[in-house]
Amino acid sequence: MTIKIAVPNKGSLSDSAIAALRESGYRQRNDPRDLSLIDAENDVEFYYLRPRDIALYVGSGELDAGITGRDLLLDSSAAATEVLALDFGRSTFRFAAPENLNLTTGDLSGKRIATAYPGLLHAFLNRQGISADVVALDGAVETSIKLGVADVIADVVSTGGTLRQAGLKVFGEPLLSSEAIFIERSGSQRKPETETIVRRLQGVVLARQYVLVDYDVKTVDLEKACSLTPGLESPTISPLQKSDWNAVRAMVKRSDVNRIMDELWAVGARGILVTDIHACRL
């Protein structure tokens, strides 16, 4: 049975989503003007849609699943559920105001707050018991204060560069931490083809987070070295031709690998090699 999967057609999530699907073994469009693509070998039909609309299509049951942002899913109030975090497209939902003001969230009462995420903002204000006017805009909210339609904005922030260019600074704690996620309709019976794509994407996410480390170490130093590279279950250890040496292989978090290489060298490991992992099943 062919399943229908939504993919962001543009924006910050699009290229990374397509790359993750390709690494998972699925065909993807080469022409950005293509609106859909059939991967007959994997029984999947991909639809390239506005990221903001994907949760609504999935929640309505028109599509089986899709990739979007956590912020967009929660803002939509669609009947869709996060299945898997994909570890790209990270951002936070923050308040921002002119740099010359020192505001806190306690100062929001009575303010006009511009946002392209009214669902998220209303939910936060209701939870906090704050009475404020929400000015719903369709993007580019940074100019709303300068144009006099808002006092404060609430927007998704990646690096903060756009806010600084507009003379704004963030304040208060993030309302939400977001990233790209794989979603499906709430309460739906997951099809085998959907289960396969979830498992494959999970393998890609994990593979990007880890590397394989191989090294040689004397038997007398083996316990110290293995304590630095315990792996997921345990490291693989093989005897070398030299009777007092061993070859060790283990998965290591990519973010820790340079520190661990230094520490392995310090305890006597030699011939330390690092290899990328392109996919895995754990």
Image (cartoon, rainbow, N blue to C red):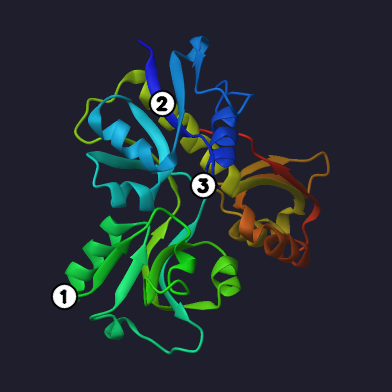
Please state the horizontal and vertical placement of residue 267, each as a whole percent of the image. Answer: 74, 65
Q: Are there few (<14), some (14-19), or many (20+) residues within 10 Å of tag 1?
A: few
Please state the horizontal and vertical placement of residue 256, each as a whole percent of the image. Answer: 63, 60
Please state the horizontal and vertical placement of residue 188, each as a whole percent of the image. Answer: 22, 28
Q: Which mark is residue 148?
A: none
User: Depth-wise, is mark 3 or mark 2 nearer the camera?
Assistant: 2
* First-in-chain label (3 vs 2): 2
Q: Which residue is mark 2?
A: 5
Q: Which residue is mark 1?
A: 129
* First-in-chain label (1 vs 3): 1
Instruction: Answer left or right for 76 relative to 128.
Output: right
Quadrant location of residue 159?
bottom right
Quadrant location of residue 229?
bottom right
Q: Which mark is residue 232?
A: 3
The N terminus sits in image quarter: top left
* C-alpha gap between disc 1 and disc 2: 38 Å
Q: Are there few (<14), some (14-19), or many (20+) residues within 10 Å of tag 2?
A: many
* C-alpha gap between disc 1 and disc 3: 45 Å
Q: Secondary structure at mark 2?
A: strand
Q: Name the residue at 46% across, 23% down.
A: 46
As rendered, which of 47 and 212 lies closer to the eye? 47
User: Depth-wise, is mark 1 or mark 3 nearer the camera?
Assistant: 1
**Residue type at the position of mark 2:** Ile
Q: Secondary structure at mark 1?
A: loop
Q: Is residue 232 above or below residue 45?
A: below
Instruction: Answer left or right for 163 relative to 69.
Output: right
